Amino acid sequence: MSAEQHLIAPEVVLDFLSAMMPFDELDEDTLHKVARHIRVDFFPKGTRLLTAGETELTHLFLIQQGGVKSFLTDDEGNVTLKDFRGEGAYIGALPIIRGTTANLDVETVEDTFCFLLPREVFLELIQEQPGFAQYYLKSFSEKIVNTAYTELRHHKMIRRGDEELYLFTIQVGDIIKQDLRKIASTATIQDAARAMAGYRIGSLFIHEEEDAENIIGIITDRDLRNKVVARGLDYKEPVSRIMTGLVAKILSQATCFDALLKMMSTGVHHLAIERKGRIIGVVTSHDIMLLQGTSPFSLFKEIGKQRRIQGLYPLSQKIPDIIRNLIKEGAKAGNIARMISLLNDQILERLLTLLEEELGPPPVDYCWLLLGSEGRREQTFKTDQDNAIIYADPPDAAREKIAAEYFSIFARKAIDHLVNCGYPLCPGEIMAVNPKWCQPVSVWKNYFASWIAAPEPEELLNATIFFDFRPGFGKVALADDLRDHLGALSARQEIYLLHLARECMAGRAPLSFFKNFIVAKNGEHRNKLDIKTQGLTPFVNFARVLALKYGIRETNTLSRLHVLSREGYLSEELWASAREAYEMQMQLRLIHQLSQIEEGVLPDNYIAPDQLSDLEKRMLKESFEVIERIQGVLKTIFPVG
């Protein structure tokens, strides 16, 4: 603690605690007793309060004034923002209850005063005040709660409500059920099967014969079925013959949601849990589903098993409910956008697979392109369709006619099915059903060349939509070829990038000279600002311009900025500031849209600053100030005048 820590008058503490949950539920005598133990400390902006895996918690931090951010830094130095907390929030309850070091990095985002409640007093309240304990423990998993209560002299556990979800509060290292089970690569398949049966497990790690710490593969019960029994393989063969050599890994401090996303995006069901370069256990999709109850993974699997296109209609309608639950649980904007993309992509892949079966194989290779926010994996609730089809150039006129007819029917049916799945039509008709956006490779290359050669307003608008494309289904090589073509064109056309940079700098941050919010003065959105157009779009445009200039193939905004930083085109400090600013605004946008949906209102992007907390207002202003900084970077790169 700092040298400024000191006692504070109990009546001041009482006023604060009596207005703060769950202290406001304590009786008067208990509250006075607690107040006598509390100290106050001051922490300047930028002070590191806790370091994950290192800091021993001697006190519970109660934020009296100011605010903090919590985040995780992995072994490679990548930072994942977890939370912002302001006045009336607490820090450190979970590690105190579990008797561990800090589970997150915590740093002040402004000058902050904290009331410090000694660890022993806090644990005594947990033991003796059931309502107090329930408040803190309801956000931990039943496993963690059990562990905590074992440490607290086997006190009776207070169960959480079945409606609660815990994907974001539990680290994968906390759900390891047993010691790491492994076997040497020279052991027989039968030895491995016996070990799995004896341990009652569905997977087994494989290590080098001479080095038991060097994990080189994994086998699962599926491998035994598909690679051994189904093929009649000799059980005496070495287990190395059927193992999967590349073991998918995840860091132990990652959340279970991180594990869920990795499983869904890679198609694996087992992840090795790694701590300080060493594999310590395994987490499976079954573990995640048991932990959460109704998991996004179960919906993901259900979509993949669907045999009728019409069967996808009700499944797609479940996605907003999944997202709503994730937001309520505390998911961050980046995680939510990734989950939306994964589920939407799964719907699309299954739909187009079944449509191909219905219409027969296509006459030439093709790729379904996702554009705009879909292409960037930055969708929110009810994003309009933005898509196109690119197909291989047919060898002759007759084949060209056949291909045009096939993809016209294919696109019309696909778009109709997507509408029935709940994805609205694009008002600007940027969809594959529009013949203009269903063309062979040569036509698409000519489109891109003409847009770049003559960057008029319409062409610049096309660039903001089409140049963020990614492959959604089909022959990925066609999309890669078009990306290569775009990269080569951009490298030769500096004047076009200059126009894009000028457009990027045309929009100003919605802050006045005196750093007040600039909001609409009248009309339907009076006293509100457009968080998408005024706040998020400048980051999207900035990342796109520099990605095109430096040949970066990523389409997601944060991924683009990360690569720009990693390759030395952006400072690490600006990358960190831009990431926090962008994620903070995305979080506000999603929470705003969720509240509208629950009120029966169509979601929009108009935020009323006067309805935000003081901490949210300060953080939003700081995020808008980053817009001015990134525009300053563009001025140094492009001579826009």
Image (cartoon, rainbow, N blue to C red):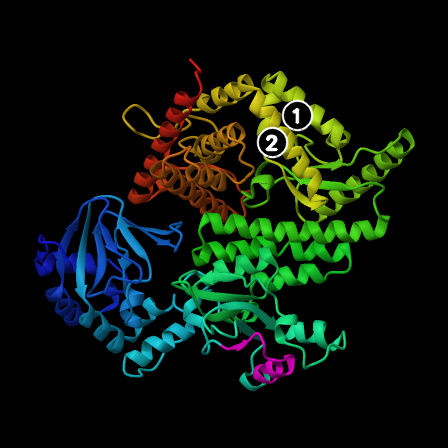
Give the farthest residue toward the top.
641
Q: Is residue 463 left or right of residue 535?
A: right
Residue 192: say if magenta. yes
Dot 2: element: loop
Q: Quadrant of residue 201?
A: bottom right
User: Which of disc 1 and disc 2 is earlier in sequence?
Assistant: 1
Residue 65 magenta-highlighted: no
Q: Which residues are magenta?
A: 181-196
Quarter that holds the N terminus: bottom left
Identify the residue position indicated by label 2 in the image.
467
Question: Dot 1: what SS?
Answer: helix
Q: Position of residue 500 (x, y in %)?
A: 52, 22
In-image side of 294 versus 157 (left or right): right
Q: Amino acid at mark 2?
A: Phe
Q: Nearer the viewer, residue 77 or 105?
A: 77
Please give the name of the residue rendered at 34% of the width and 71% of the height, measured from the top-left corner.
Answer: 134
Can you identify the residue that label 1 sits on? 448
Gap between marks 2 and 1, in whole Å? Answer: 9 Å
Q: Which amino acid does the dot numbered 1 rest on?
A: Phe
Q: Do labels 2 and 1 touch, CB within 8 Å? A: yes
